[in-house]
Image (cartoon, grey):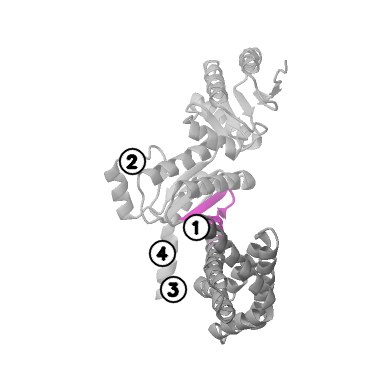
Amino acid sequence: MGVTLIVRPDAGRRRIEELVRQHEDRVLKRWLEITAAASAGRPDQGDTAARLTEIYQALRQSFAGDGDTSDLHGLLAELSRSRARQGFSPSETASAVFALKEALYEVVEDDGTPEALRGFVWFSKTVDDLGLFTFETYVTARERIIIDQAEQLLELSTPVVKLWEGIVAVPLIGTLDSARTQVVMEKLLQALVDTGSEHAVIDITGVPSVDTQVAQHLLKTVMAARLMGAECVISGIRPQIAHTIVTLGIEFGDIVTKASLSDALAHALRRSGVELAGNRRTRVTVRTEEE
Amino acid sequence: MDRVPVLKLGDILIVSIQVDLQDQGVLALQEDLADAVVATGARGVIIDITAVEIVDSFIGRMLATIASISRMLDAETIVVGMRPAVAITLVELGLSLGGVRTALNLEKGVALLNHLGGAQIATTAR
């Protein structure tokens, strides 16, 4: 009794392998028909058909050979990636793989032997695994894209701009975390070395909120710049943020803070010895123009 | 053992650290520098660490100690050419080099010393 239970599934598996080999043309044709019907109206039907044919052959070889599925998995990953690029959803790709069951079932039905039916259960499980594998490939590829984009965002969002000879500024946009602060700090310090600037303005107008951690990061940046022989001014402190900073009891010590970037620039210019024409004269000119 | 040379330029002493300093070398440098300040009557010491890529708390303390020794001998110490990575490391170590002045490069360091010297002379004259 025990022996028959072990032998039977194996016999079923062999029968399915035979059917897959013998009726290759018929099963493959049916499979392509089903997938083409499911993805009607999409471009590149021929591309998908060619890929499915390759996959079918790899599947047959993995049955015939020692069960090595690396080829098969490689082809499936390629299919998943190419279909993802064409705008297919991952479940559509998985359904296309699952359609192979439907295609083979017709052959199994015609065959009608109990071995074939039993083997079909095993086959169904194998195809399920393959379908899920395409799903996993899709998710992995998607995750890699997200990680890449996050890195690109990190690079993009932290420009160091030169305001004047010897004055650079970093307009910070978005929430500051340790990773971003590290990038900002390195970029700012490198810019100080490259441009030989002695003054830096860190503008936090675009930072939505300042907590103790963000303040700590800012202080570290300022201290590092000081160690290199440059002075930092923090600008763009909005009223709410000033309130938060005082409420939290954060001590900025002798670090110069200014309300706006223009104030910070004026301060840095004065410190670097640039003479500024008086504001009053500008105002008079404006008035004359208005009249 | 490598000894770090102390160069004299006018009334400024320049020390350029080009090698990875070991503890013994640091102590030797401190002695040499103190001797040189007394012998030349220098009013400023510039320590150039452009070539230093790795720092630890010991090097950080060395800079502070040299600054204190020089100040005792009435010479201002300026550390120049600190690399960004070094600055970040020192901040992470919690060393802010309180009594040490810094400048971006040797040129700006000399300019800063001249500025400080000018200011001192001006106050004395008044």
> Considering only order in the chain, which callout, 4 or 2, is on the residue closer to the N terminus?
2
Q: Percent x, y for residue B52?
A: 65, 31
Q: Compute the Cα span from label 4 to label 3.
A: 10 Å
- Chain of the residue under label 3: A
Label 2, label 3: how far apart the Cα atoms are: 46 Å
| Residue B9 position by quadrant | top right
Residue that label 2 marks? A250
Residue B91 numbered tag: none
For the residues beneath circles 2 and 4, the answer to whether they share a chain is: yes
**Same chain? Circles 2 and 1:** yes
Please report contact status of discs 2 and 4: CB closer than 8 Å, yes or no: no
Q: Which is more N-terminal, label 3 or label 1?
A: 1
Q: Nearer the viewer, mark 4 or mark 1?
A: 1
Question: Quick one: label 3, few (<14), some, or many (20+) residues within 10 Å?
Answer: few
Q: Is residue A241 left or right of residue A235?
A: left
Please tell me the numbered disc located at residue A283: 4
**The residue marked by circle 1 belongs to what chain?**
A
Query: Which stretch did the figure color magenta?
Result: A146-172
* Gap between marks 1 and 3 measured at Cα: 106 Å
x 40%, y 70%: residue: A287
Q: Earlier in the sequence, mark 4 or mark 3?
A: 4
Residue A50 image point, x, y percent: 69, 77
Q: Earlier in the sequence, mark 2 or mark 3?
A: 2
10 Å crowding of disc 4: few (<14), some (14-19), many (20+) = few
Question: Would you name the residue on which mark 3 appears?
Answer: A289
